[in-house]
Image (tube, helix red, strand yellow):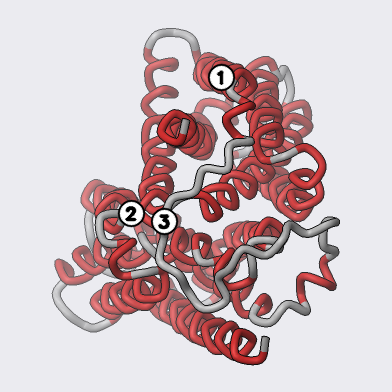
Amino acid sequence: MYSLLLAIIYIAFISLGLPDSLIGAGWPVMHTALGVPVAAAGWVTMLIAGGTIVSSMLSDRLTHRFGAGRVTAVSVLTTAIALLGFSLAPHFWVLCLWAIPYGMGAGAVDAALNNYVALHYAARHMSWLHSFWGVGAAVSPYIMSFALSSGQGWRGGYRIVGFLQVGLSAILLLTLPLWHERVRAKRPAAPGAGEPAAASAPLRLPQIWRIPGVPWVLAAFFAYSAVEQTAGIWATSYLVQARGVSVTTAASFASFFYLGITGGRFLSGFIADWLGDRLLIRGGIGIALGGILLILLPLPTVAALIGLIITGLGCAPVFPAIIHATPANFGANRSQAVIGVQMAAAYLGTTFMPPLFGWLAGQLSMQLFPLYLVVFAVILFAATERLTRAVDRAAQQG
């Protein structure tokens, strides 16, 4: 039962990544077909992000009422229906309407799955599962490319991924009894760990905010997302405009940043249980800062290219390790509520920080790119250290 459910969760994480890069891969064709400017993609992504933030905040209430298995199955089905709606949308405004349930489904399943894995599986699985998310995100552009080259158009790309999601939701619905099994793998204990009774009712945001360490973990997720998404979106432009790298080479190394994250999460899974969440977080941030410094310093251009890959490798273990540490840091009875707001903070960073850098670069200079990354990487380090102190202090007092 343990292995079967774990396999299903791995598949679910791949499905989480599948839709995320579809719009980027298909938009050059989509905006022409829908008769809107290129910049209109921002409206779709903002609506998706808004839906994910709302559903992440509601995840504690939903999981309390329906359970992680049902929330995951219904959320995947909601996302599937929204993707099929994308494939049928005759106008841009219809696409925007479908973006809302798309985001709502994605946010709920993300929070529910992350909490379930943090509670029931070892740290290595959290790293590997997030690596599998990267597999899904990497595969979907190829699905869109296949649809475009085979004459199915961009609608065909969304249709293929939508039907894949329908199939996964069917599997999840059929295997709901497995989610009730209290399978639990051994994982390293951390300060604050324990087996408190489940919370009797969902926690409200003010209650979550007052939990020692929560403001710091939210700052950490916001800062991490600012680093990852800004690097992923603007690295190519920086290399071309500020370093004089050819567009082809710059695009390749920007993709290596994401390969560094995916590969780094796969590799960190082998040492996650041995090092523990705290060392993974500190080591990852340190490596990421080293990579950013290679981009920042006036060294030959090849150093900046290598630095981008190292930054991705450093980012790799941070996000999954912070999530996996949540039950130990805040208690298993409150982890779903905390992970929900953590996901919301991450989506806020993803949504607003890359556009802010784009505005600053337009007003000042693209040379700000590594400095911007350094600022948020330092905030990330400071926030995680303050989180550790707050959790340790609460454990000593309680």
Q: Are marks 1 and 2 in contact (CB under 8 Å)?
A: no
Name the image quarter holding the C terminus: bottom right
Which residue does the image show at 51% across and 66% down from the upper left? 325
Distance (Cα) linking label 3 and label 1: 27 Å
Task: Give the percent coordinates (x, y) of residue 199.
Answer: 78, 59
Query: Which label's residue is closer to the chain start, 3 or 2?
Result: 3
Question: Farthest residue toward the top?
Answer: 151
Task: Give the percent coordinates (x, y) of residue 100.
Answer: 75, 37
Q: Amino acid at mark 2?
A: Arg
- How many other residues sit within 10 Å of disc 1, few (<14), some (14-19) or many (≥20)? some
Query: Is residue 30 depicted above or below 123 in this figure?
Result: above
Which residue does the image show at 27% across and 78% down from the upper left? 290
Q: Amino acid at mark 3?
A: Lys
Task: Give the percent coordinates (x, y) of residue 139.
Answer: 38, 31
Residue placed under numbered mark 3 in the picture: 186
Disc 3 or disc 1, which is closer to the eye? 3
Q: Relative to 93, is 279 on the left or the right?
A: left
Q: Are marks 3 and 2 in contact (CB under 8 Å)?
A: no
